Each structure stands twice: as C-alpha cells, then as structure tokens.
Amino acid sequence: MQTKYLILILGLLIVILAHGDRGRKAGGSGRYIKSILGIENGSGRRIKGYDYIRVLAVIAVIGTHVVQSDTQLSAGSPGWIGLRIAETAFLTCNVLFVMLSGALLLNRGEEPVASFYRKRVFRVVIPMAVYYMFYLYMGLYHSGLFNPANWLDAGRRFLSGPSDWNPHFWLMYVIISFYLTAPFFRVMVQNMSDRLLTSFVFLTFLMNGALAWLPLAGIQFSFVTILCGWESVFVFGYFWTRPVSKRFFKPFIALGAASFVFTAAVSCIAPDGAEMLFNRAPSMLFMAGGIFAWFSEREDHLKMPGMAVRVIGKYGFSILLIHWYILHYVTEERLGLFASSFGGIGGTVFAMAVTLILSLLAALVFDNTVVIAVEYVCEAALKLLEKIWKRLTRQSAS
C-alpha cells in the first residue's frame, strides 16, 4: 500500500479519536454537535453586538475581494459607481476585525501568559498553519503534499509571511501579533483612567491622520509609533468596552455616516486618491467606530443572533482563511460569477452569497477533519512533553 494511503487512513483514525474525545468532554453527542455549529448555550453574558459585527466583517471581506477582483465595468458607468460605493463600505472590514480583537482580548481578567499563549496557538496559529499548507498544496506542491521536504519548505514560508497564493493572510499575521502583545497591552489599558484612554484614542486619530494626509502637502511623516500603527486600532476596539465610550455613541455614528458619504464620493470621482482615506485613516476609523457605536448603543435591544449568524461567527476565522480560494478558483473560475455579472450590484450580491456559503461549508468540513486532526496530534505531543518534563524535574529534585 502506498504511503499516502497509509497516511490518509491514519488521519481518518485520528479524526475519529479527536471527535470522540471532544464529544466526551462536551457531555454527549447532542451538546457536541451544537458546539460544532456554534449554537450551544454559552456561559456568561454574551455581547450580541459583537456577533453581528463579526459576521458583518466576514461578509465585508468577501465583498471587498469580489469587487476588487473584477475590472470588467468601465469607469464612470452606473455599475462601476455602485461598486465603488459598495467597496467603501466593505473596506471597513480590516479595521472592524482589529477593533473586535481589541475589544475581546483586552477586556478580560488577568491570565497567566503561558496559558494565554497556549490557548491561542490551538485556536489561531494551528488552524492558520493548516490552511496555509492547503494554499501551498493547491498552488505549489500539488501531488507532493506528503514529501517531508515540502513540509520544511512550508514551515519556512509560513514564518516568512503571506505567499503569492494567499496574500490576504497579511491580516492574520497582524492579528497574531496582537495575541503576542495582548497580555501586556491589557495591563496598560486597564490601568488607564477614562480621561487618559480617551486622550490616547484622540492622539491616535491625529497621528494616523498625519501619516495618511501630510504627504499630500509634501511632508513625509516620520514619527511612526504604535500611535499610528494597527496597535492603535487594537486599543480603539477596547475603548468601546469602557463606559466612557457611551458619550461618544452619537458623535461617532454621525461622523461615521459623514465619512462614508465623503469617502464614497472621492472613490467615485478620484479612485486613486481614495487610497488615503482607507485602512487606518481617520475617515475609516470614524466609519468603523460608528458601526461599533451603533451596535453598542442598541445592545440591550438587539435580538439574540439566529443560527445563521452564530454558525458564521463560529467559523468566521476559517471563512477568512479559505474564502480567497473559494472566490477565485470556484466562484469565478469554475462558476463564472463576477461582480460585473447581472449588472454589477446583482452580480456582487450573488457572487458574495455563493462565496460565503461555499466558504462556510468548506470551513465546516476542513476544520472538523484536517484541522481537528492536527490539533489533536499537537495536543497529545504537548501533553507527552509536559509529562517528560515533570518526570525530569522530579528526578533532578530528588
């Protein structure tokens, strides 16, 4: 029997063992199935607004790439204008994800650094590495998946950053950098007074604005610090978890709406100049902040997220990882669906819906087969190393 078939059989056995182990820990198959779908009853008070923001951000990422990959519509046409306006809204996705990470990671109690890192390795790093390997297999290795030399090459590439086959992974590396710094940032921001935190956020808006807009006046802004990096957006997300943020709900909703109108207009009139209004520019921060403010203001009146929202939220990270392949090699290449199909707007909505559904299905299958198998093996190996370490320390102590 060929080596690849032996590995596949071994992998299948590991998947069965992994699901069996998690099913027992969950307290039965019914509860475990609910946990797989993300519809189990969680403990503590669930922040409903974050569930909706997460799903909006996932949809916006897909929408961004659907719009940006289609160049068929002529500039100035009604369909082209519609796509530019839609892209303006979609591009809040990166800021929303970073803000959401800050709101969730920094608004927590103190936790041992080693324990924090261990949890995030299994929740984020391992799935990301497995999906990275998938892209390399589909784009580079093909039949050489089981070649150990390719595994070493994949490890080197993973540590080097995104590849030509998964350029959208840049955001994942940014998010991982926040996981590395979160235990330390948490102590810093939680010990800030409301006034000091508000001043910090205000200063980050000024710094990000200077970085984005001073070059228009021929001034190269060189004071690049965490005050104008993605770290500033990370802290901005935490800001909305503090009671002091309530006084800024209505101003940010108004400024976010005004920023959207202005940015969309610039995107339609001077598309090349609109780049200075995206990413960490204050215009985009106002838009994303307005979304956070809108959901935060209505938190007590929001309905509990339905099954669709909770399932998409559960697999949101994996959808981010796999959607690039689904969009470009399935939706577009295989199915022939583009943003310009059906008059632009209709094609965008349809391509987004197909990509979202197929990405969710792919993530559901991939996470519960390949990813869970790798996690199970890594967890078993880590437990074995911990036993060996304890035994060695006991022997040295005696």
Image (spheres, helix red, strand yellow):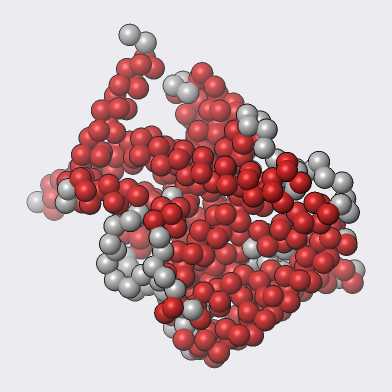
Q: x, y (%) of residue 85?
A: 75, 60
Can residue 243 be seen here? The reply is: yes
Q: Residue at coordinates 61% horizontally, 56% vertically from top-left?
A: 60
Q: Which of 288 and 235 is in front in this view?
A: 288
Q: Tell me: 278 left or right of 189.
A: right
Q: Tell me: 336 left or right of 48.
A: right
Q: Residue at coordinates 56% horizontally, 78% vertically from top-left?
A: 293
Q: Quadrant of the N terminus?
A: top left
The mark total stands at: 0
The vertical placement of 214 against 17, above or below, is: below
In the rendered image, which quarter is residue 48 located in?
A: bottom left
Q: Residue at coordinates 69% horizontally, 48% vertically from top-left?
A: 346
Q: x, y (%) of residue 17?
A: 22, 35
The vertical placement of 297 against 153, above or below, is: below
Residue that protrudes farthest toward the top in the picture: 1
Residue that protrudes farthest toward the left in the picture: 398
The vertical placement of 306 against 107, above or below, is: above
Q: x, y (%) of residue 317?
A: 48, 51
Q: Nearer the viewer, residue 70 or 207?
A: 70
The vertical placement of 299 against 102, above or below, is: below
Q: Nearer the viewer, residue 188 or 168?
A: 168
Q: x, y (%) of residue 54?
A: 50, 61
Q: Tell me: 328 left or right of 176.
A: right
Can residue 68 be seen here? The reply is: no
Q: Residue at coordinates 81% horizontally, 41% vertically from top-left?
A: 72
